[in-house]
């Protein structure tokens, strides 16, 4: 595959650029975002299993209006790397189909539905971030008072990806040897929500006294994702152990 760029009087042969072939660590993969999100276990689901140093990580999110339980919550996310959002389809949402934008480092996050109780409302989008290739990468989740917007909780966490000095899988009880590791943004979001929901004093605003409702964590699926990542990694280790034992038995 070639991409031709012609500038000034330079000949085409002087300006041909070629996309280098795959280097090996990341096998080229393809997904259909519409098909992928029909079975999504959580919001911000990585579409590919690559989120190490330098990886471009597109993640999917899909929300639909729910007449009986329209509360999706609202929080803020801070990231030292930029994120690009693309709306692949929407109805009765604050973002339009085909809309593309770059988020600010600190940005609000919610369902983006204008009327969350409307069963006809929906949005399907991707949020893509380019993992750091060197240096620290950090993120934070913030919850603010629903009444006066005073900050109630800020959970900072180390999001430095695997392959960069400072990567710390011990945060989630993992190790560098894990073959199936969580996307750090989801782990950090889940940790923040657990801390926020488990302590009413944290949700009580020190400024206006309003007791904020817990974040509807189940709607975002983060705990399910974290649990399933752990199970998947354990399952892969179990398979490798079974294969090693089988090989040893045959050799004996």
Image (cartoon, rainbow, N blue to C red):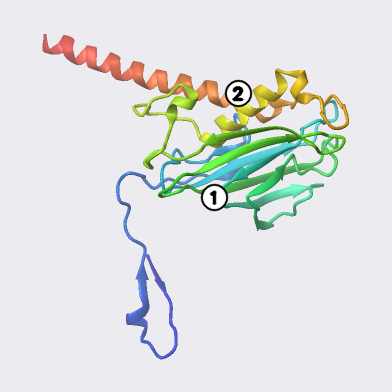
Q: Residues within 10 Å of mark 2 (few under 14, many from 20)?
A: many
Label 2, on which residue? Answer: 223
Q: Residue at x 67, y 39 (%)?
A: 62
Earlier-in-chain disc, 1 versus 2: 1
Quarter the C terminus occupies: top left
Give the class, few, some or many, for how many residues have Cα within 10 Å of label 1's Cα (few <14, many ≥20). some
Label 2 sits on a secondary structure element that is helix
Q: Position of residue 135 (x, y in %)?
A: 43, 47
Depth check: give the residue in front, 6 or 39: 6
Q: Quadrant of residue 208?
A: top right
Query: Left of 52 or right of it: where is 145?
Result: right
Which residue in the protein does label 1 denote?
81
Outermost residue, left side = 252
Quarter of the image with the N terminus is bottom left
Residue 39 seen in this snapshot: no
Residue at horizontal 62%, vertical 35%?
38
Q: Is residue 186 left or right of residue 91?
A: left
Q: Position of residue 93 (x, y in %)?
A: 79, 47
Q: How many marks?
A: 2
Instruction: Note whether 139 is above or below 88 in the view shown.
Output: above
Residue drawn at the location 42% of the way across and 36% of the way down: 167
Q: Nearer the viewer, residue 230 or 172?
A: 172
- Could you say which is closer to the camera, residue 36 or residue 184? 184
| Residue 242 found in image quarter | top left
Image mark for residue 163: none
Which of label 1 and label 2 is nearer to you?
A: 1
The residue sitting at the bottom extreme is 9
Q: Residue at x 39, y 48 (%)?
A: 28
Observer-nearest residue: 178 or 106?
106
């Amino acid at each position: 595959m070639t991409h031709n760029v012609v500038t000034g009087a330079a000949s085409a042969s002087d300006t041909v650029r070629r996309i280098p072939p795959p280097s090996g660590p990341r096998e080229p993969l393809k997904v259909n975002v519409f098909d992928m999100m029909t079975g999504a276990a959580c919001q911000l689901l990585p579409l590919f299993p690559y989120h190490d140093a330098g990886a471009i990580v597109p993640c999917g999110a899909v929300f639909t209006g729910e007449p009986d339980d329209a509360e999706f919550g609202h929080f803020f996310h801070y990231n030292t790397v930029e994120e690009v959002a693309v709306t692949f389809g929407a109805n009765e949402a604050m973002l339009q189909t085909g809309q593309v934008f770059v988020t600010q480092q600190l940005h609000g996050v919610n369902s983006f539905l204008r009327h969350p109780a409307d069963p006809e409302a929906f949005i399907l989008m991707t949020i893509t971030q380019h993992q750091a290739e060197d240096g620290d990468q950090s993120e934070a989740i913030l919850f603010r008072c629903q009444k006066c917007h005073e900050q109630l909780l800020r959970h900072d966490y180390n999001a430095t990806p695997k392959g960069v000095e400072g990567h710390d899988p011990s945060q989630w009880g993992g190790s560098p040897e894990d073959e199936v590791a969580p996307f750090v943004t989801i782990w950090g979001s889940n940790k923040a929500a657990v801390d926020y929901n488990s302590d009413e004093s944290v949700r009580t605003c020190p400024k206006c006294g309003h007791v904020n409702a817990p974040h509807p964590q189940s709607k975002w699926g983060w705990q399910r994702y974290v649990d399933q990542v752990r199970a998947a990694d354990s399952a892969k280790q179990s398979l490798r152990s079974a294969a090693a034992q089988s090989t040893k038995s045959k050799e004996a």
